[in-house]
Image (cartoon, rainbow, N blue to C red):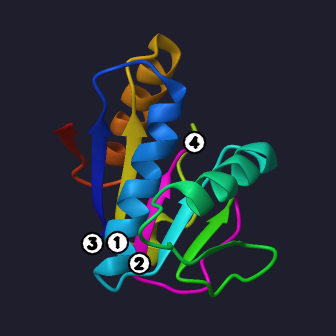
C-alpha cells in the first residue's frame, strides 16, 4: 500500500514549501526513485522548474516539465499520470492526486498558512477514508 506522509513546516512562508519539495526531490532521486512533483497549476510548475535549476549549486537535479519529458528522473506536472510507477509523489496541490495508487510513497508538504492547514487536515481525513494510514512528520 502507498505510504502517505504529511511533512509539516514550522512557518507560513510559501517559498518554504517549494524549497522543501526541491530537497525531497533531490533525496528521492539520489535513492533511485522516480519523482513526480504535482503542482497546483502551470505557473507553479514553471516556478518550481526555475528553482530546481538553481537550488543546489554543487549538484544538478535532473528534472523536466511533464510536457517536455515525462520520463525524466524528476518530473514536474499537474494532473498527468506518472510515466513511471512506484516512485515518489510530492504533492504541492491542494487536492489529492487521482493517481495516488501508482506511487509507493506520497508526501504532502504543509506549512502554517491557515487556509492550507484546513485543506491538509481535510486531505488527511480523505486519505483515511480511502483506507490509507497517513502519518504526520514535523520538520
Q: Position of residue 3 (x, y in %)?
A: 26, 63
Question: In the image shown, does 73 or 97 lie closer to the viewer?
Answer: 73
- The answer to whether one can see residue 104 in this image is no
Which residue does the numbered mark 4 point to in the structure image? 95
Q: Distance between the residues labelled 2 and 4?
A: 19 Å
Count neighbours of disc 2 (C-alpha within 10 A) and say few if under 14, some if 14 to 19, many if 20 or more: many
Q: Distance between the residues labelled 3 and 1?
A: 18 Å
Q: How far apart are marks 3 and 4 (CA)?
A: 20 Å
Which residue does the numbered mark 2 point to in the structure image? 87
Q: How far apart are marks 1 and 4 (CA)?
A: 22 Å
Residue name at image x 38 percent, y 56 percent: 23
Which residue does the numbered mark 1 point to in the structure image? 28
Residue name at image x 57 percent, y 42 percent: 95
What are the residue bounds of the magenta stretch? Answer: 78-92
Outermost residue, front direction?
A: 58
Which residue does the numbered mark 3 point to in the structure image? 1
Amino acid at each position: 500500500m502507498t505510504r502517505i506522509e504529511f511533512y509539516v513546516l514550522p512557518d507560513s512562508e510559501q517559498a518554504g514549501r517549494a524549497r522543501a519539495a526541491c530537497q525531497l526531490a533531490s533525496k528521492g532521486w539520489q535513492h533511485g526513485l522516480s519523482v513526480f512533483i504535482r503542482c497546483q497549476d502551470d505557473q507553479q510548475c514553471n516556478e518550481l522548474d526555475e528553482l530546481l535549476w538553481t537550488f543546489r549549486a554543487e549538484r544538478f537535479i535532473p528534472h523536466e516539465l511533464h510536457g517536455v519529458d515525462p520520463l525524466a528522473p524528476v518530473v514536474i506536472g499537474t494532473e498527468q499520470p506518472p510515466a513511471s510507477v512506484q516512485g515518489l509523489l510530492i504533492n504541492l496541490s491542494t487536492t489529492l492526486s487521482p493517481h495516488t495508487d501508482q506511487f509507493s510513497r506520497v508526501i504532502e508538504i504543509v506549512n502554517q498558512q491557515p487556509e492550507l492547514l484546513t485543506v491538509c487536515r481535510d486531505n488527511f481525513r480523505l486519505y483515511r477514508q480511502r483506507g490509507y494510514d497517513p502519518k504526520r512528520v514535523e520538520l
